[in-house]
Image (cartoon, rainbow, N blue to C red):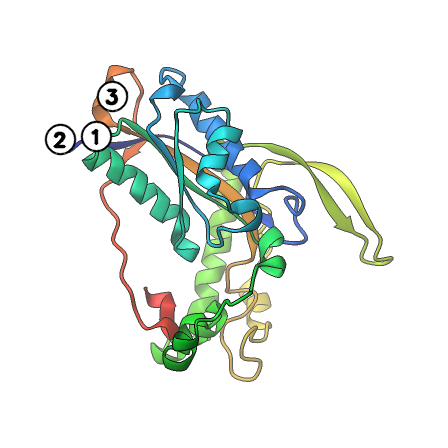
Amino acid sequence: MAKRQEAAIVATARTGLAKSFRGSFNMTRPDDLMARCIENVVGKTTALDPAEIDDVVVGTGFPEGPQGFNVGRNVAVLAGLPLNVPGSTVSRFCSSGLNAVAVAAHMVENEGANAVIGGGCESITMIQNDMNTTNLFNPWLMENKQDIYMPMGITAENVAKRYNVTREVQDKLAYESQMRTAAFQDSGTLLEELVPVTTTCQVKDKETGEVSEKEVTVTTDECNRPGTTMETLGGLGGAFDKENGTVTAGNSSQFSDGAAAQLIMSAERAGQLGIEPLGFFRGCVFAGCEPDEMGIG
């Protein structure tokens, strides 16, 4: 049995978050984005021989299409890692990337691995409208626990009503989040973790409807709105419950495309190579709940 090791996070990288459908990554594959992040974390730790990487674990909400076919292995190859480096894919919807990092850390802590890459990628643009819905709904679940297929926006409304999360509280949290994001962007702090990505995207002319392609370089997040005010948030109607809803386009997370990766090493091996840890992974716990209120999970 391998001795327990301390899991050190030694490098991290992510793309900017681009708006789904209308954003800069609307023609960019999620596996290509993930590969860029892996290349970046490996490039930040040149003292580590890539052949020493024990595994690549990638989380994705919908492991199909361009983020299917075991995307974890695909991105390892795309990133130029030696072919002895394996890869795997995990899925827990919104927390898939976190789950992948937890799995990577567990491998270091408990299974004798010295270096594992964990992270996640998602292209809502490429998956959402073209996902495979053949035989999607299990008959028993539809009969006995249909809420398991309930859209997240509706479950958010259930949480708001059931636990008295008022519209004002939701809007205030959204406003504070927007202001904090804007402040971090202005400070340049986020630049250390962002990987510039040059790609091609489709742009639709609002007046003519004409669609064209242009080259862009994504160096920051596109999804936040620095000009947000409490007044503009308060003027928005419910996105899922048009009459009595409190969950709006302003206090909800926007659909976005992007990827992120972390390199996790045993603290001992990192020390031997002179690699300074950014932090340490201490643990992660998941819990189930009623499907119709998954926001409290």
Q: CA distance from mark 2 to mark 1?
A: 7 Å
Look at label 2 and name its amino acid: Lys
Residue that badge 1 annotates: 112
Residue that badge 2 annotates: 3
Residue that badge 3 annotates: 269
Q: Earlier in the sequence, mark 2 or mark 1?
A: 2
Residue 58's place in the image compared with 19, above or below, is: above
Q: Nearer the viewer, residue 294 or 159?
A: 294
Q: Would residue 256 appear left or right of 86 to someone viewing this image? A: right
Tell which tag, 2 or 3, sits nearer the viewer.
2
Q: Nearer the viewer, residue 3 or 155?
A: 3
Look at label 1 and name its amino acid: Gly
The quarter of the image holding the N terminus is top left
Q: Is residue 19 visible?
A: yes
Q: Earlier in the sequence, mark 1 or mark 3?
A: 1
Q: Residue at x 46, y 21 (%)?
A: 43
